[in-house]
């Protein structure tokens, strides 16, 4: 399983979950701290302008420990309504495209998977990411309707 944080410019931080590990609040908060460091490296100046997170409402994402970690990092979260799996841009936009070239392949270890994802990303225009994020308000409207 891969955790991917991205914005309209592309992937900022990618992590592959080690075998026999589950994502819990502690793991996820640690991922958010690593994301913060990646933003400092990859997107200079973005932290001072503010980071807005949008993801699904899986337990590790919505636990009190995670919420406290998000607050400590100074991030803000967009709400995610329950029972709406298609509100996370990674789910409705990124993962489907990412899986196409990776489907059916077996990887010896996470380094190879990470390498293949980075190779895939090189061929993706920045507009791809912008388009995916621009579809979020459209999906909100459909849900409200």
Image (spheres, rainbow, N blue to C red):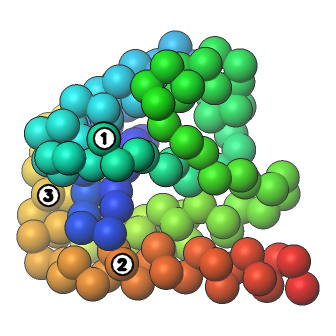
Cα distance, mark 2 to mark 1? 19 Å
Horizontal side of residue 5 vs 140, given as left or right: left
The label number, if any, that marks residue 47 in the structure image: 1
Return the residue at label 3: 118
Q: Position of residue 68 (x, y in %)?
A: 61, 19
How many other residues sit within 10 Å of disc 2, few (<14), some (14-19) or many (≥20)?
Answer: some
Q: Position of residue 72 (x, y in %)?
A: 49, 19
Q: Position of residue 81 (x, y in %)?
A: 80, 56
**Does residue 104 sit above or below 127 in this rendering?**
above
Q: Residue at x 42, y 46 (%)?
A: 51
Return the residue at label 2: 130
The quadrant of the picture occupied by the C terminus is: bottom right
Closer to the chain start, of discs 3 and 2, is: 3
How many other residues sit within 10 Å of disc 3, few (<14), some (14-19) or many (≥20)?
Answer: few
Q: Quadrant of residue 144?
A: bottom right
**Does residue 114 appear in the picture of this structure?**
no
The secondary structure type at the circle numbered 1 is helix
């Amino acid at each position: 399983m891969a955790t991917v944080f991205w914005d309209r410019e592309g992937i900022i931080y990618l992590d592959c979950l080690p075998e026999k590990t589950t994502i819990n609040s502690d793991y996820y908060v640690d991922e958010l701290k690593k994301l913060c460091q990646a933003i400092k490296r990859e997107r200079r100046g973005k932290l001072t302008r503010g980071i807005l997170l949008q993801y699904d409402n899986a337990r590790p994402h919505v636990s009190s420990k995670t919420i406290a970690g998000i607050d400590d990092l100074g991030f803000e979260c967009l709400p995610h309504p329950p029972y709406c799996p298609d509100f996370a841009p990674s789910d409705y936009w990124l993962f489907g495209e990412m899986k196409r070239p990776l489907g059916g392949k077996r990887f010896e270890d996470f380094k190879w998977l990470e390498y293949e994802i980075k190779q895939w990303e090189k061929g993706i225009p920045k507009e791809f990411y912008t388009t995916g994020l621009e579809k979020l308000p459209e999906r909100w409207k459909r849900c409200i309707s």
